[in-house]
Amino acid sequence: MKKKLIVSARDRGTRHKLVLKMKLTFIILMGCLMQVSATVYSQATKFSFNFQNKQVLEVLKEIEDKSEFRFFYQREQVDVTRKIDLKVTERNVEAVLDELFKNQGVSYKVLQDNLIIITPSTEKSLNTGFSQQQKSVTGKVTDASGAPLPGVSVAIKGTTNGTITDVNGQFKINIPVASKILQFSFVGMRTQEIEVSKITTVNVVMEEETKGIDEVMVVAYGTTKKSTFTGSATVINSKQLDKISGSGFTEALQGMSTGVNVVNYEGNPGGDTRIQIRGISSMSGQTTPLYIVDGMPYDGKLTSISPSDIESTTVLKDAAAASLYGSRAANGVVVITTKKGKGGKIAVNFRSAWGTSDNAVGNPTKANPYEQLTNTWRAIYNDQYYVNKLSSQAAGDYASSTLLPHMVNARVNSKGETVYVTPFEWTGDASNYVLHDGAGNCYTNPKLNMVWDESDYDWYGAVFSRKLRQDYGIDVSGSSANGKTNYFTSVSYLDDKGYANNQYYDRYSFRTSVNSQVNDWVTVGGSLAYSYSRQNVSGANRALVFSNTLNSPWLRNADNTDWLYSQKTGDRMYDFGENSSNFFGIHVLNNGGDYWHNPNDESFESNEAGMITSHYFADFKLPYNIKFKTAANIDDITTNYYTYGSAVHGEGQMEPYGVTVLTNGGSASRSNYKTISLTWNNVLSWDKTFGKHSLNAMLGHEFYSNNKQYNYGYGEGIMQIGQYELASTTTNWAVSSSRDRYSLLSFFGKAEYNFMNKYYLSASIRRDGSSRFSKESRWGNFFSVGTSWRISQEKFMKDMGWLNNLALRGSYGTSGNDKLIPRKTSDGTSSDGDEILYAYQGYYDSDNLYGSAGYKPTTVATPNLKWEKNQQYNVALDFGIFDRLSGTLEFFNKSAKDLLYYRTLPLSAQVGNAEGVNTNIGNVRNRGFEITLNAVAMRKHNFEWDIDVNLSTLKNEVTYLPGGSYVYTLRTAGYKLEEGHSLYEFYMAKNAGVNPENGNMRYWIKDGNGGWKTTENYSNVTVNDYQYCGSAIPKAFGSITNSFKLNGFDMSFMWYASFGSKMYDYVYKERTTVRDGVGIIPSLVDGDAWMKPGDNAKFPRWSASSFSNTSKASDFYLFKNDFYRLRNVTLGYTLPNSLVKKAGFSNVRVYLSGDNLLTFGPAAKRYTEPETGVQGNNYNGNANSDSGIQGSRRVYMGGIQVSF
Amino acid sequence: MKKIYKTIKSLLLAGLILSVSSCSDELTTNSSTAIDSEILSTAAGLNMVLTSAYHYFLMNGDDGGTSQNEACYAGIPGYCMYYDLGGADIVSIINYGGSVVNSYRFDPERTQVGGSYTGKIWTTMYKTINQVNIIMDALPGASGDEALKTKIKGQCLAMRGICYFHLIMNYQQTYAIAKNKRGVILRLTSADDENKGFSTVQECYTQIVSDLTNAKTLLANYDRDEMWRVNADVVSGELARVYQVMGDWTNALTEAQAVYQKYQILMTKAEWKSGFSNLISDGCKELVWGIKYTNLSNISSNTEFNYWYNQDPSYGEGMTDGPVYSFINFFVDDKYVSLFDDSDYRGSKVTKTSNVTDNDEKGSMFWHRTNNGSAEISTKWAYNKFKYYGDANGAKQGHTYPEFPLMRGSEMLLIMAEAKANLNKTSEALTDLKTLQTAREVGVKTTTSSKDELLAAIYTERRKELLGEGITGMYDLLRLQKPLYRYGSSVGHYSWGLSYLDGYNASDAAPYGWLPSNDYRFICQIPQMELANNNAISESDQNPFSGQ
């Protein structure tokens, strides 16, 4: 036995899982054999000490440092923290120990190899083992309010022996007399240790767990204590998540963690959320992290998990935290832990909430019918007077006489007259709606007689209305009488009817989990969750911009006396361009039907999603502190999409309305997606503490297989009303189906080392084989190393009582990515759905013509394709001072290399769909600072005030782009991808303001001599004149949360802010440009539009014939997008215990909450939702694609939570 | 204890063995729908790749139907619209934006390097070329019937020749003045490096003639099953066009004559006036090449038919009122209408300026949309040549499945006349011209002995006979090196059709706009993504945006 193997058995708290008996027996046996030679060294080695007020512990350590002696003792048995004065000169070890333990009831024995065992002297003989005397301790455990806490675990510290509290919070435990400390633990509560050596009854008040260094957090393949963690991760608990009334938990993550940028760009119920952890490291711009639910990769919809089933969420941000998930950790990992049974008495929680919602940024008001007439008149007049040089009289006459057809179709009324149907009674003359003075001044005819109600042309009112949102849940948890089996079941229902049109999201979810400790060494458990949702995505669309108040969403008869009604339902018919001369092609109330309930036979776009997650595990405790866990998980996910193009409503609808089938009938489609994903993992772990050294190692294996199936069917010609199935279609069928599989095989290991709870080291390695690469290059290796130093544990820091914690952490590591998602060079967009699954293979896809089989090249074979690698380092400083303020300062640098990139071929070398080659090329770097502060602002009698602040910065930069830079356009906004700039950098012409003389917009162009000049002719503006105009990626974001508690009241509010990004406001562009069919927003434009020479105007001269010349793409529509949002306000009241107890409840809380109540910033002033897709362009909503339906919603909820 | 060990060990072992052994093979996955390059090993397989190549060639693959931005670029039939919009005869309103309005206006983004439009023709043509190159490279090694292989190769060469012809016309000035200028990139095998430089215009034309000539030989015995396929007649007709552009009148005459001999029964008055939407179904005898849109090969509402503003008056004036969804964009210029004399049935017109009814309009080619409330629209001339009543026999909003001519005997006759005139065989040329004029019942037929006057008459006859079929407009202006003139008026061009041209002054009594002959604004710049990704070319190869 060498010195290094004998380690002081210093206690390591809960991590200390040694079986005392075995250990001691072993040592004692060895000791007896070798005792003889020991005494020689012990007698010969002399010590001289002069200690004042030193801990026994430190004396022992001094001896260890100066000699080869090593001490072995149990901390519960020997009080080593006792302070003493000691003065000895040239004494051997036995003399020193005699002095040290004088009158302490402690004996020691010097064994072979200078090992000294210190034991309480009550244990007279080591050879007789531990014939322990027992004593009984009883007591009661309550929470802070005095309510008894059932199910609290009561254990003898350092052992697994213990009991749990009963229904009344009471317990009785028999403990060895030598045992000094009882540990009381309960999930969500701070573990307490009570000294019981001299007492037999204890009453314990459990306190809620506060964030701190001893917080246990769920990390990759296990849990760890925050203090020992060398990586970077944020834990968000259920209390924080519950405050936000979202469809899914990702919505609620906004502002909860540094480095995690969450954008709620789809405000419709059940809408998606974009989450971006520490920047964008793939060329595609896709940032979807890996989601792990209860240890298993999760493939379902994020909204399929009821947020109320989530116990905690851990976001793993750096390599040390995430690289154990190697292959898929490039975008970070979000680890979700669902609620489990907590043991003890049956606990029932019921909650329900009701509320409503509207848009976070209010809707604007369109120009009213009078303004609409004069605006359009002005635009026509301008063309004739300023461009075509007519006299002002002639230009005015022309404008008056040609005005109405710009907005309204001519129709023939019952008298056979050609008329225009507007909110006004037909005047008999289309040219007298707007009159003028012959000098360019116009006014609406005072004789116009309004015959519609305002609501008839209130387009926003037609689409939006506040509707009910309701949310219910109940969960029951508990454990068997012996505490060995615990369970949790929950059921919840969410019904969110949204704000726009007929949108809604309904979700039913069920979850059950059971864990059972079969015997001392085997624990098995499993869970089954089922979630089912229905969603209707009808919402607001661009048609809302393309509407004006001279028209109505509903169809008016040609006599302008009444609306036209459906013969079937009596509802008003929609106007699909019969009256409006600028029908957008899509009606504002498009998809107002619903697959499950469609009495008015309207078109619909509905979907349903179902998910079953079945999970099973077995945990084995093996000898030598080895544990083995095997677990399997199957996610069965189905998503079905149902669409119907109405057979009776639409372009070309005929009388009698509502019952006459369209010429082509209706159409229907079905898309069914089914994913079965299977994960099986096996993990061996080992924990060992040798005195000051703790070691923890883990080895694992994982297999993952993802099988996707897709079926699609489409047909047209539904000629019956009320039929929505494919069976009713008669023509133009289209079908498709496919099956795809993706699999991963992984081996991984991790080791963590801790010396004296001061110095921590960790290392991990993972080897992944992915089916996305060829046999030759499919294996990738990823590793990480991390270290941390608890400075505050050092001796020299001990005296600083004000310092609770100071630690320095650092990590470096790699993670990978095997997902290849092409980024379109035409508009810079990409979509998760475009992922190339068989990237290395050369393929031909079917491309039929006239029903004959055809095949086109789709991919170029690239067998050398390999893993994309992310290298990341992270340094952080954690601190806690005055028991008041704690926080973390962190810096990270993440370099993505060998990016999986669909390198576009020269256009002339492209063929079929093979427009590029899959390759590993290009580097992107993300770096940033992150600051988290948690402050206890006040703790007064009955009053608590906490402040939590976090702030993150991000600098995203393309550092290597071998393909060369290029310019692309997305919805008229220009961008450039170039080394040295971010992935989404605006690159456009800059405007030079409106020329006061003629009202033309001016643009900066190069003058050919290295300078700049302006032009009014946009065709002179070329790519060479474009300039960088800022990035769509925010430079910083963060939140501030204030929480208060006063008696039974609790209140919190959270502000969220994002700074430094730019947005191209396409919606604003359309709302401020006078154009046929578009009703502008007067409050945005009034007083700022050019009306006559000399006007210093913001907006150029309106034009009817060349409206596009008045709204050319330039930085005019590019805005700073800093915004501040009152993300959440919650006000709660917990009823007094005395009151609720009588009713048989243990806890009753009522609350009111509001999300996104206030939004500030330049975007909100333009009625524009500031949260956009990654490219900062809000065409047709807030996403980059047309799927962005509406902006974030304000959600107001009131609810009650009851426990019994 | 021992029992535990045993259980555990066996469990562990079983676990590990199971996992490792069962999983390794699981890492190889394959697509369930795509196939690998095996398809290139048989003639039957290559024939399927050829089918897909036709899909690009004729419809720009699946993209042709995606949006109105693709309408002008939806393969060869789309270019028919594109070339003629660049002329003086079609007038487009801006009802619905997109490529047709851009093309009409000569909007800078139509040809300027930064925009997306300049790469449209480039990409469709090169995708077709690269796909037929793959086929031709694989043919010699492929198993299968030699006769089939010959047919495949002939069609591949023909398509390649036609594609290069369109490329060279759109990315460089015309052959007559640009023989030695930079041409396009000649990709002749699939093994070519992705980085490849330009050939000269002369080299490109040499290749085009060679490809088409070889194709003609290979297709000599090819009896096509569908009118959209390229057979020897189509190849001859294309060769006639190529020689016509090159000014090689002897060969142009030979080829045109060869085709005309087989397609000389010209359309009758009834056929002409019934519209061009059903030439294939009606068995039109002068149709050499044509395409049919069906529900299996639909480019939706992106056909030329959906852009003409010519639905019957009774349907109404809205886009969604008519028998098909129509963008109701195109009229013709009054100057075009006045080219026809009174007896020419191609120019029959309704002169009424109010209350035009279905009956008035149906028997005529030109008429005014007098029921339109907009004075600007009601004065323009609607043109009935391309009119379609949908697949529902005129019921509102049927599907758009029209047929479209890509080559007719009349054109061959006019090429013959032009060739003969240029070869100074004026009387023979006049005979050919009169043959057409007689068929169209032209009242005052051309009677000139002056070569220049005769040629002018032939060029005019081309406009009258072929407008909208992609071989007049910009196509003729470029090869004949003529300037474009458009005149603004209530019955003519809109200001937006003039404003990007030269010389436009709105305050003129008769405003006009013009583009000088050979101006680069007719021609596309080399697309940005070609310059960015092709190392063998550089900015110095770029066309100027404008100028001669």
Image: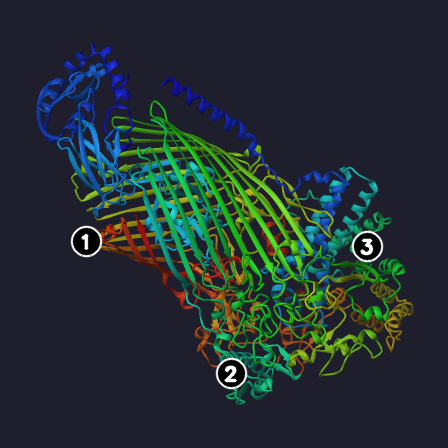
- Side of A17 where B153 appears, left or right: right
Q: Quadrant of residue A312?
A: top left
Q: Mark 3 falls within which chain?
A: B
Residue behind mark 3: B235
Residue A819 visible in the shown view: yes
Q: Is residue A1025 left or right of residue A109?
A: right
Q: Which type of secondary structure does the marked residue at label 3 adopt?
A: helix
What's the residue type where badge 1 is placed?
A: Asn
Mark 3, Cα crowd under 10 Å, few <14 / some 14-19 / many 20+, is: many
Badge 2: how crowded within 10 Å, few (<14), some, or many (20+)?
Answer: some
Q: Is residue A1124 among the parts visible in the rendering?
A: no
Q: Residue at x 32, y 53 (%)?
A: A1201
Kind of residue at disc 2: Met
| Quarter of the image with the N terminus of chain A in it | top left
- In this view, which residue lies farthest toward the bottom? A437
x 34%, y 29%: residue:
A696
Between A765 and A221, the one lying in front of the other is A221
Tags 3 and 1 on a common chain? no
**Chain under callout 1:** A
Instruction: Give the chain letter at badge 2.
Output: A
Q: CA distance from mark 2 to mark 3?
A: 65 Å
Q: Which residue is mark 2?
A: A450
